[in-house]
Amino acid sequence: MSTPPPVTTGSQRQQRPAGSPPAGLAEGATDFDLVAAEYDESLPGHVVAHYIRKRVRYITAHTRPGTALDLGCGTGTLARAVAAEGYAVTGLDPSRGMLGVLRRLTPGANAVTGSGTDLPFQDGVFDLTYCVAVMHHVAEPDAVLETLAEMVRVTRPGGHVLVWDHNPRNPYWPLLMRRVPQDTGAERLIPEREVIDGLTLGGAKLVESRALGLVPDFTPPPLLPVVAVLESVVERIPLLNRFCAHNVVLAVKE
């Protein structure tokens, strides 16, 4: 994680999408502040590591190292892994508590407090802009649209935008979201079509949309290798793969 692009005010930006004042992502900040200190410990480490590896493999397979924005970076677990692959990552999150943990774990990290609906960066400064498990917290349709437009805006022409989020078709998410402290019931699982349409309206062209992931959080460590193999099989089976855990939408800015 290296020197971040210059932070700007709204009056300094060009081509700023019209919309309401910062909302959506910023509205969930208090809930994550409350759990920030225990957040990483509340998740099964072996399952987290599995998905971090999966996401890093996807990013490195589809993009080249360059400047990257991790929108909704939380405590920085994925940002650190992406940075280790040669990307200059800037993290942004509305939760000061989560960013405090990130800075403690990664001294000198570039971490900015802000809202996804009003990104404090100039146009076209990132080669890659991505968010993982963020959009269902943004929730409100207008805020989702604004966040997607902002992700495209801060990405350079020819750069990539990646949205990796919960798949509404997967029946396990409502069960899990009822028992994790950071989810309050205000969340909304976002269909991939809504993400695709939002990125397209923002000025990006779809590269691919697919469903990935199947390993649940309750997988015992000894069974992870077996479940991971099953996951890779299901991901390749048409129709059945529509029920995988995550929708993954990759676009390129035109």
Image: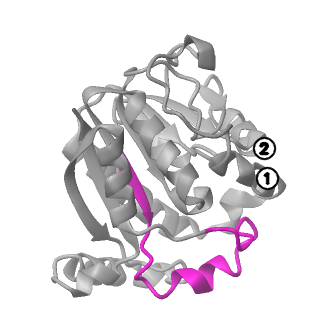
Q: Nearer the viewer, residue 223 or 92?
A: 92
Of residues 153 and 183, the one nearer the viewer is 153
Q: Position of residue 102 (x, y in %)?
A: 66, 39
Question: Residue at position x 49%, y 69% from top?
Answer: 47
Report whether residue 82 is seen.
no
Q: Could you say where residue 63 lies in the image, as x and y percent from the top left?
A: 23, 38
Relative to the observer, which residue lies in front, 225 or 207? 207
Q: Residue at x 75, y 37 (%)?
A: 100
Judged from the image, the secondary structure of the residue bearing numbered disc 2 is: helix
Q: Is residue 137 left or right of residue 231?
A: right
For label 1, the residue is: 37
- In the rendered image, the quadrant that contains the C terminus is top left
What residue sits 22% from the left and 50% below the top? 206
Up the image or down, 186 lies above or below 206; here it is: below
169 magenta-colored: yes
Circles 1, 2 touching at the beta carbon (< 8 Å): yes
Disc 2 residue type? Gly
Query: Is residue 246 inside the magenta stretch?
Result: no
The label shown at residue 82 is none
How far across and how far down the image is residue 32, in percent?
75, 55
- The residue nearer to you, when weighing 84 against 63, is 63
Q: Which residue is mark 2?
A: 97
As displayed, is residue 112 above or below residue 27? above
Q: Taking 79 as reference, is 95 left or right? A: right
Range of residues picked out in magenta:
162-187
